[in-house]
Amino acid sequence: MAISTQSIATASARHPWRVIALWIVGLVASFMLIGNLLSTAVTNEADITSDPESERGTRLLEERLRGPTRLNEAVIIQSSTLTVDSPGFQSYVEGIQGEIDALGTDVVESSASFYSSGAASLVSDDRRTTLLPLVMAGDVDEAAENVREVLAIVERANGEGEFQVYVSGFASVGEDFNKALEEDLQRSEFLTLPVALLILVVVFGALAAALLPIAVAAIAIVVAIALTAVIGQQFQFAFFVTNMILMMGLAVGIDYCLFIVSRFREERSHGRDKEEAISISAATAGRAVLFSGITVVVALLGLLIVPQTIFRSLSGGAILVVLAAVAASLTLLPAMLSLLGDRVNSLRIPFIQHVQEASRDEASGGFWDRVARIVMAHPVVSVVLATSLLVAVTIPYFGMQVGFSGVSTLPDSFQSKQGFDILEREFGGGEVYPAEVVIDGPVNSAQVQSAVEKLKSSLQGDAVFGASHFEANNAGDLGLLSIQMAADPSAPAATNAIERLRGEYIPAAFDGVDADVLVAGISAENLDFFNLSEDYQPLVVVFVLGLSFLILMMVFRSIVVPTKAILMNLLSVGAAYGLIVLVFQEGFATGLLGFQQVEAIEAWLPLFLFSILFGLSMDYHVFLLSRIRERYDQTGNNTEAVAFGLRSTGRLITGAALIMVAVFGGFALGDLVMFQQMGFGLGVAVLIDATLIRCVLVPASMRLLGKWNWYLPSVLSWLPHLGIEAPELPEAHRAPEPVASRG
């Protein structure tokens, strides 16, 4: 059942122009698909498919009260000198409202003003600020398009004379988030690629070899985005899926090629001819790449279990780019190496190349060999110290609060953030993000009306809840109590208020009343998402750990290796969680690092980080352990095999880890706090994995366990052997057969 990466690479190397031509055709087709289909493959909507309370309440409103859900926006008009009672103020407001109404009902379904309705709730206490509530036409994606026309009017009007004009609401905030995403993406590309190229030059000592991984990663990214565009015609992705593809594509695409190109150059230095070097590289590093990719995909598949479109978008985009990177590494890269041959070492960097050649001999010592031997000389102390440090760093995780990056986390330069601050300060949130209490029953009856009044009365003592408005449908069998909320709908204050509403106020007010009461609205949807993530976390963890264990057990023919790998990866993930909470939630060193302190960690982040980090950490683990197992199969000496594995992969894994840190760090330097948290968490986890895990825990634990590292019970001997075959080394480079103990 061996999966032959060797035969695939050999065939690609023998017919390089055919393979390259096929990839070029695929690349051209990808650009065409992206141009024609990508815009309709992504959406601003985020749905939970398990029908939670907020979804049921919204559906009742759509079916029996107000029709399809429309997004609310609020145009905020403020003057530092005039009040709403001034004719000049009235004329200015009516002029803006007239421009907005002139857009047509297919853009803005309806608008209102203080002057047309007389509603006191649309005027601030100092009477210098007023609202124009808007109901946008169309669904969420159509409203996101339509709001740009409103924004154009607002931007022209803002700053005219004595007036400041803003617009804030779901669609306008989404538009600003999209702008911030685009800026963060451009900043990440600008910072990441030069740093990655510099690291590759240091690792390879030659510019030609350094450019290969970047080229292959770029191709994999384009292909993955094209596949997303095609699949998205049937199953739409969240709008930030392209950011995820870029980040993961650069991280894994460069690393996979780095491993294979390095092994090719190593085999050429041993005197192998070009085709044999490609074949052996595919049979060893290529197979490690394949199994690393499989492990990453397995980890990401766990997110598909969660019935929520954000998780499925994150997972789907990452899976597609990992598969594309593996395919390119096993086919396109061998074809390119076949054509380049030793020209892969062109454009050498003299000093770096000299150092590389001096340290290439496997039998030599060097830094990584010394690290391995020092750790293995004191294995118990090494394990205890490293584990204690990681456990201590994990402790803050248990105080994690989850939430969403709402409008309050946007940079102050965005107009929707400025508008929201005024809404919250002057109007308690206005009517843009209300809590919606949906009452299914005889809503005009005295019993239900009494319960509604009791509920409204109980909410008066809760600072988050403000004014309320009740309406019923014509049949009198469904009612809606809209309650203003003085909080960012994504912040813990809002979701905690929804919990009180559902768990305390409504049960007390409607006790014994013949009606079903549901809470909908954006804050309720957020709370349902948080609960969903928490409920599905154990299932995802068990799925990922179980499948990863099975794969690693078949690869390394051991139950000890996968057990240790899982425990070590859990340690690194836990430490990353703890550091994220310490920095972003507790505010430790946020100013120094340039991050934003927030009340809560992104609700999707723990599950996402678990899956991504588990997959990526297995990347290094598989590559390191494959070299150790390869040497152990050749010599039978466990200690020497561990030392060989660490010294032969140390430079490569360190370079690969630094590239990943550069990629993730580029995202962490953006303005959006969700990408700051994600980039920081991924970056520190990779650093932990490449240092404490790889340099301390792996060699120390393998020294302690000796031959038991490779223990597989005889009852499991029937399992398929997916091992990475070790090639026969030339006599001149074969390690001497050990004469001492084989421990």
Image (cartoon, rainbow, N blue to C red):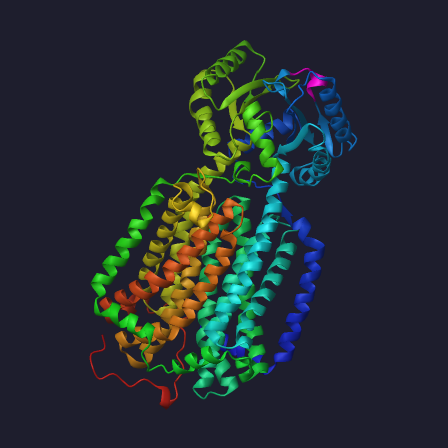
Snapshot quadrant of residue 549: bottom left
Position of 561 with respect to 147 (left or right) is left
**Residue at horizontal 59 percent and vertical 13 percent from the top:** 444
Does residue 43 appear left or right of residue 88 in this picture? left
Q: Toward the viewer: 161 or 530?
A: 161
Number of numbered tags placed on the structure image = 0
Q: Is residue 70 visible?
A: no
Relative to 212, residue 670 above or below = above
Q: Residue at x 31, y 54 (%)?
A: 390
Where, quadrant-wise, is the N terminus in this rendering? bottom left
Q: Is residue 281 above or below residue 53?
A: below
**Start and end of the magenta stretch?**
113-119
Say left or right for 128 vs 488.
right
Residue 288 versus residue 523: which sits nearer the camera? 523
Q: Position of residue 459 (x, y in %)?
A: 47, 18
Vertical order, 641 against 540 (above or below)? below
Residue 699 on image: x %, y %: 29, 68
Asked if residue 429 can be seen in this view, the reply is: yes
Q: Position of residue 605 (x, y in %)?
A: 46, 47
Q: Residue 131 appears at what percent x and percent y?
A: 65, 24
Q: Which quadrant of the figure contains the C terminus?
A: bottom left
Which residue sits at x=46%, y=27%? 497
Residue at the bottom extreme, as displayed: 731
Whether 71 is among the magenta residues is no
